[in-house]
Amino acid sequence: MKQLDSEKKEKQQWLKQFGAHVRKLRLKKGISGGELSRTLMIDKSNLIRIEKGRVNTSVYMIKQICDVLEISMKEFWKDL
């Protein structure tokens, strides 16, 4: 049971770190949340959930985010 709790906390922490990274990269490019969500064709609320670490997004969505931010997947993962 303790291991499951530990894994859950680790996952939550990592997702928050991931989301903050997405937000940092978006802001660095000067793109608003609304603009990014429209370009990705997702609800703004879904982008907010990604950036707050409340959802585990797909690899394909990460690729789409990279495309919009005009960065490579390698660059995306570099500082995470």
Image (cartoon, grey):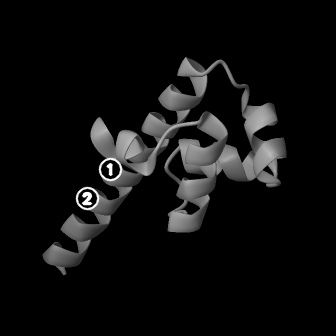
Q: For the residue marked with disc 2, what is the amino acid?
A: Glu
Relative image position of residue 12 (x, y in whole percent): 37, 56
Residue 53 appears in the picture as rendered: yes
**The C terminus - image quarter:** top left
Asked if the residues shown at circle 1 and circle 2 are in contact, with their CB atoms under 8 angstroms apart, the answer is yes
Q: Position of residue 28 (x, y in %)?
A: 54, 19
Crowd around label 2: few <14 · some 14–19 · many ≥20 (10 Å): few
Residue 70 position (above or below residue 73): above
Quadrant position of residue 2: bottom left
In this rendering, position of residue 25 left or right of residue 31? left
User: What residue is drawn where x is 74% and y is 38%?
Assistant: 36
Q: At 32% across and 50% down in the image, what residue appears?
A: 13
Q: CA distance from mark 1 to mark 2?
A: 5 Å
For the point 59% across and 29% down, the residue is 26
Residue at 54 percent across and 43 percent down: it is 52
Residue 42 to residue 3: above or below: above
Q: Secondary structure at mark 1?
A: helix
In the displayed orientation, state which residue is furthest to the bottom: 1
- Amino acid identity at mark 1: Gln
The secondary structure type at the circle numbered 2 is helix
Q: How many marks?
A: 2
Residue at the spot of label 2: 10
Position in image of residue 63 (x %, y %): 55, 56
Label of residue 13 in the image: 1
| Spot occupied by residue 45 in the image (x, y as percentages of width and height) | 75, 48
Density class for disc 1 (Cα within 10 Å; few <14, some 14-19, many ≥20) is few
